[in-house]
Image (cartoon, rainbow, N blue to C red):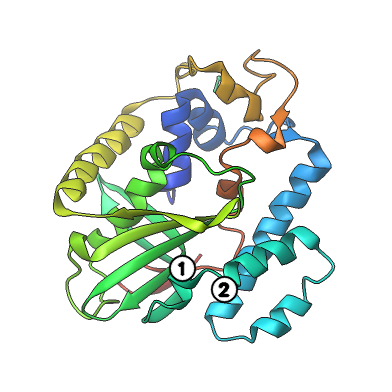
Amino acid sequence: MLPANFQFSQSNLQDYVDCPRRFQLRHFQAQAWPGVQAEPVLEYERHLERGARFHRLIERHQLGMDSAMLAATVAGDAELSAWWRDYLHFDYLHDLPGRRYPEFSLSVEIAGARLVAMYDLLVVVSGERVVIFDWKTYHREPSRQWFLARLQTRVYPFVLVSSGTGLSGGNLLPEQVSMVYWVAAAPLEPVVFDYNSKRLAVDCDYLSGLIREILTLGDGSAWSMTADESRCRFCEYRSLCDRGVYPGLLENISNIDDNIAGSVGFSVLGGVGEVGF
Ligand code: SF4
């Protein structure tokens, strides 16, 4: 069964939507399995580490540290330095007025469970709007439709509006929220989604239904495996499920930043005070 303090997130809900069996193995049974998610393995691990460093750099910059000083700390890493330069030219963010909340978490109760969202950056223009930023270190830019279908695009605005956070100086309307994906492969072409009341209602139904469905599943038998075997290429349980031995190539992995989320220090405001995470 799920641990008593289990929190749903965009990442574990995406696991369930991609493959119920993966959710069961990873979160219900906490099954450790020595499969790698992508290869070349060393390059994959370096990419994860580089992504975590990039998130930390932006956090520090958004907290007010000097950009030249931060650049000096990554001078020996050509790819990270290039991401950093591209980030510094991301005027969409830098021209936006408002208070910055980097690496910030919020959570809400839904369907008798807790749903958490860990934001790379929130920019709050008091009384006007809140913009959610998310950094993706993908080597290729996914389509807008791909982003639209991701749980993250639903969970993040939903939690922000539903948490009743006082960040914006009053009740936050869905129409005051937008979500922006910055992608390393196309740094000047952010993917932007504006939220609205209709979307909020749809997401509330969908997310509560999904969580209820998961909570009603028992552990007596194996949950269903995805019919889309391409998803197994980047799943550590491949050999356990008899879905192949060799991992997919790093350049084709689509959720690499999900493995970075949570690696940077977060604070959680659940509307009732700050909690360590
Ligand atoms: S290997 Fe495939 S079927 Fe097995 S848990 Fe992973 S995604 Fe699901």
Residue corresponding to mark 1: 121
As helix, strand or loop, the secondary structure at mark 1 comes to strand
Label 2, label 1: how many angstroms apart (C-alpha)? 8 Å
What type is the residue that disc 2 sits on?
Glu
Q: Quadrant of residue 205?
A: top left
Q: Please report contact status of discs 2 and 1: CB closer than 8 Å, yes or no.
A: yes
Q: Residue at x 60, y 42 (%)?
A: 140
Q: Residue at x 41, y 40 (%)?
A: 150
Residue 270 visible from this viewpoint: no
Q: Is residue 21 above or below residue 97?
A: above
Q: Position of residue 8 (x, y in %)?
A: 40, 46
Q: Residue at x 56, y 86 (%)?
A: 64
Q: Is residue 137 above or below residue 272?
A: above
Q: Left or right? Give the position of 113 relative to 30.
A: left
Residue 151 visible from this viewpoint: yes
- Residue 55 tag number: none
Q: Left or right? Give the position of 133 relative to 125.
A: right
Q: Position of residue 203 (x, y in %)?
A: 24, 44
